[in-house]
Image: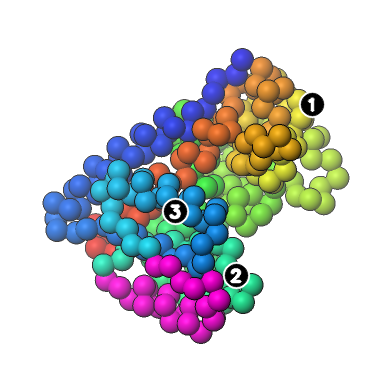
Amino acid sequence: MGQLLDGKLVAASLKEETLQQANELREKGIVPKLTIVRVGAQPSDLAYERGALKRMAACNIDVEVKELDAEITQEDFVKELKAVNEDPATHGILIFRPLPKQLDENAIQYVIAPEKDVDCFSPINVAKMNVGDKTGLTPCTPTAVMEILRHYEINPTGKDCVVIGASNVVGRPVFELLLNEMATVTICHIETKDSSKWARQAEILVVGVGVPRLVKENWVSEGTIVVDVGINVDKEGKMCGDVDFDNIVDKASMITPVPGGVGSVTTSVLAKHVVKACKQQNGL
């Protein structure tokens, strides 16, 4: 059986690091604060919000939730966001996405203050990630993948890595983050002719497509490290990933479970980013 890459252990380690830094800031009279901007009350947003609130409290980070009407106009949303941008007490801003159809994300991404954009919505932070500028703020879930690798001392440098999925939320950022670590990276998308062929060549395989158990046993070579970013509910109502875990776990050398893998680390990365943004804004 492959070694389980336990996201809960990674999250606990990150929490301790972040808590120490937050306490050091408070000793200097600086209170790190996250403001969550939520439009409406989608169940998925509320579930993530509960986890974020719990993690911020554990890291001694203040949080404010700005709940906006589900029918808010573009003009009013931009006005509210600019007010949060200009709030000196707020160091990190998290906008729950996707936004309702009446709001134009392509325009809003240019409004959020890049220095407070803790989940890499702003094109400025995307560009910084792409060129390896460490002052930028990277997306939380793809960064959680990298934190798991770091925690388990898996060095991507020089390794053949394959990313299945090319979304702006997971696949592309993971591609860039691995590339920044000097890995050789192949990315497969919906038009790739045979993703399984590329997956079998991977030393590290990262999967994030939102299709339950897409990656089968014959996609994975012996000894591959498998990181499953997917969180799905199958026909039986059971939570599962994008990887057929039960049939791959004995073939992989290391593998993340679902639940208990990448998803467990995301809010800890969010807290880490709030503290990073706070320190940078205060010249620390």
Count the numbered circles shown.
Answer: 3
Q: Which residues are magenta?
A: 66-88
Membership of 81 in magenta stretch:
yes
Outermost residue on the right side: it is 193
Q: State the SS at label 3.
A: helix
The residue that appears at 49% across and 50% down in the rendered structure is 47
Of residue 134 and residue 167, the one placed in the foreground of this image is 167
Task: Please state if 249 lies on the left or on the right of 269 as rendered.
Answer: right
**Pointer 3 residue:** 49
* Label of residue 100 in the image: 2
Q: Earlier in the sequence, mark 2 or mark 3?
A: 3
**How far is mark 2 from mark 3, CA to CA?**
17 Å
Outermost residue on the top side: it is 1
Q: Quadrant of residue 204?
A: top right
The residue that appears at 55% across and 76% down in the rendered structure is 71
Q: State the SS at label 2.
A: loop
Q: Earlier in the sequence, mark 1 or mark 3?
A: 3
Q: State the SS at label 1.
A: helix
Of residue 178 and residue 53, the one placed in the foreground of this image is 53
Task: Please state if 222 lies on the left or on the right of 263 as rendered.
Answer: right
**How far is mark 1 from mark 3, CA to CA?**
37 Å
